[in-house]
Structure formats: C-alpha cells, structure tokens
Amino acid sequence: MAPKKAQDVTETQAAVEALRAALDGVGIEFPSLRVDQASPALQLVELGRVRADVAARLARALAKDPRE
C-alpha cells in the first residue's frame, strides 16, 4: 500500500484528470489546471485563471445550457 502522502497525490491527480476530461468534453480548457503541490495533504486542485468567455461557457455547461 502506498504511503498516505503518495495516495493523496494520486487521488488528487485522478480528480484533476477527471475534471480535465469533463471540461474537454464540453470544449473548455483550463490552462492552469493541476494538483496544488504546496499542500498535498489537503488534496487541493489548482484551477487557475480563465478568460471571461471561458467562465461563461463553463457556467452554461454547468447549467446544461449549450448555447454559445
């Protein structure tokens, strides 16, 4: 069994990849999406910054409103 710290990073990386795949599925890219390496025990995901049009597309995708 992997040490707790390694397991936390693995789980967090899996979450990042799942989110990246879901975003890709609706045509949205977060360029800075990654595991936050500063606090691995907290299992934080760094979303980064995105342009306003990307944020609006994300909001529509979450609202299940595919209008462009």
Image: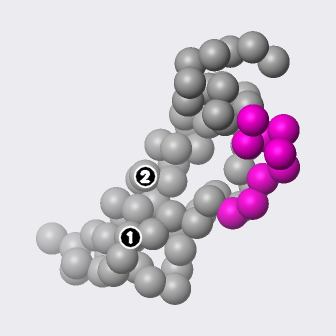
Quadrant of the drawing holding the N terminus: bottom left
Magenta range is: 48-56
Mark sitting earlier along the chain (1/2): 2
Question: Does residue 40 appear to the left or right of 61 in the view shown?
Answer: left
Quarter of the view holding residue 52: top right
Give the distance between the C-alpha atoms of the residues marked 1 and 2, in whole angstroms: 9 Å
The residue at which mark 1 appears reads as: 43
Say what amino acid the circle numbered 1 marks.
Gln
Q: Is residue 67 magenta?
A: no
Residue at left offset 78%, top offset 40%: 54
In the drawing, what numbered circle is on residue 24? none
Residue at left offset 58%, top offset 44%: 20
The reply to whether residue 47 is in sight is yes
Residue lying at the far left of the rendered structure = 1
Image marks 1 and 2: residues in contact by CB distance under 8 Å: yes
Question: Does residue 13 appear to the left or right of 50 in the view shown?
Answer: left
Number of marks drawn: 2
Q: Nearer the viewer, residue 58 or 12?
A: 58
Say what amino acid the circle numbered 2 marks.
Ala
Q: Position of residue 46 (x, y in %)?
A: 58, 66
Q: Is residue 52 magenta?
A: yes
Count residues near mark 2 (Cα–Cα under 10 Å), then give few for <14, some for 14-19, many for 20+.
some
| SS at mark 1 in the image | loop
Question: Does residue 23 appear to the left or right of 42 in the view shown?
Answer: right
Can you say whether 4 is above or below 29 in the image? below
The reply to whether residue 24 is in sight is no
Task: Indicate how the structure is coloured in the image.
Answer: one colour
In the drawing, what numbered circle is on residue 15? 2
Q: Position of residue 60 (x, y in %)?
A: 66, 26
Question: Does residue 15 appear to the left or right of 3 in the view shown?
Answer: right
Q: Position of residue 62 (x, y in %)?
A: 56, 29
